[in-house]
Image (cartoon, rainbow, N blue to C red):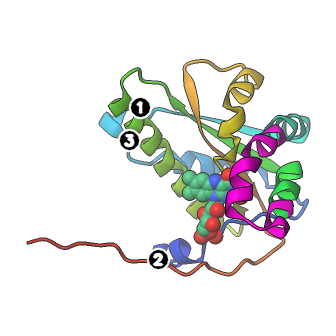
Amino acid sequence: MELIQAIKERRSVRKFKPQPVPHALLERILKDSLWAPSGMNTQPWKLFVLEGKARDEFVEVSNRAVKLLDVRLRELFNDKMRNYIHGYFKNLGGAPSVVVALSAIHPQDTYMVASYESTAALIQNLCLLAHEAGLSTCWMTGQIWVEREILDHLAVSGYRLAGVIPIGYPDQNPPAPPRKHEDITWLS
Ligand SMILES: Cc1cc2nc3c(=O)[nH]c(=O)nc-3n(C[C@H](O)[C@H](O)[C@H](O)COP(=O)(O)O)c2cc1C
């Protein structure tokens, strides 16, 4: 697959088939994702892959976020969409695997931004590589509302939550949202 095809065709999928992702395939995608650039080559990420019982337990913790997120959902969406989002959080669309991406804490804001951005580059790699392999993902940050609970649940310190990425074989084919604007300024 051409890179441009992967970039344009990758979609956020919120309904997955129960079929598990082969371990070797997921491992290869995750290892290849690590080839992201990072601020000062710090490679500040830490990944968890949750499957089986660990996945189910994580989904319970993650689901607590949507109740807190609801104030914002009410501002942004109608009831139909809100109910859909609540339903999605309940089981993360049935994704058989969930990747949790963490970013190393740096006490200085400027470096913390670089830490998040580096992990974001890794997450995009992951989403594109998964798409190329016939899998789908949904990059999520809604769980930031329960970040402390998630870090405690994973028994991690020294890291912040960068993203939660359910991954599996897609059971829906959402349309591509059109680009809203091209805010590119050329100066010469
Ligand atoms: C940083 C980031 C955070 C996101 N958080 C969520 C989320 O919490 N829940 C969700 O359902 N989708 C989330 N998304 C997915 C976006 O809703 C999605 O990318 C957007 O609607 C465009 O659709 P597309 O990914 O299919 O192009 C997030 C995406 C990004 C990049």
- Amino acid residing under circle 2: Ile
Determine which residue is flagged by label 3.
Answer: 38
Q: Residue at x 30, y 35 (%)?
A: 40
Residue farthest left in this picture: 188
Q: Main secondary structure of the magenta part?
A: helix
Q: Quadrant of the C terminus?
A: bottom left
Image x and y of residue 55, in percent: 84, 40
The circle on residue 112 is 1
Answer whether residue 180 is magenta in the image.
no
Viewer-proximal residue among 75 and 114: 75
Instruction: Assign a secondary structure to mark 1.
Output: helix
Instruction: Assign a secondary structure to mark 2.
Output: helix
Does the numbered disc 2 mark a residue whose Cβ is under 8 Å from ligand 1? no
Cβ atoms at labels 2 and 1 below 8 Å apart: no
Does the numbered disc 1 mark a residue whose Cβ is under 8 Å from ligand 1? no
- Amino acid residing under circle 3: Ser
Ligand 1 falls in which quarter? bottom right
Cβ atoms at labels 1 and 3 below 8 Å apart: no
**Mark toward the start of the polypeptide (1 vs 3):** 3
Q: Is residue 81 above or below residue 56?
A: below
Image x and y of residue 33, in percent: 53, 50
For label 2, the crowd category at 10 Å Cα-Cα, with few meaning under 14, some 14 to 19 and many 20 or more, is: few
Where are the magenta residues, as a range?
63-83
Answer whether residue 73 is magenta in the image.
yes
Nearer the camera: disc 2 or disc 1:
1
Viewer-proximal residue among 144 and 29: 144
- Alpha carbon separation for disc pair 2 and 3: 22 Å
The circle on residue 4 is 2
Residue 96 seen anywhere in this rendered image of the structure:
no
**Mark toward the start of the polypeptide (2 vs 3):** 2
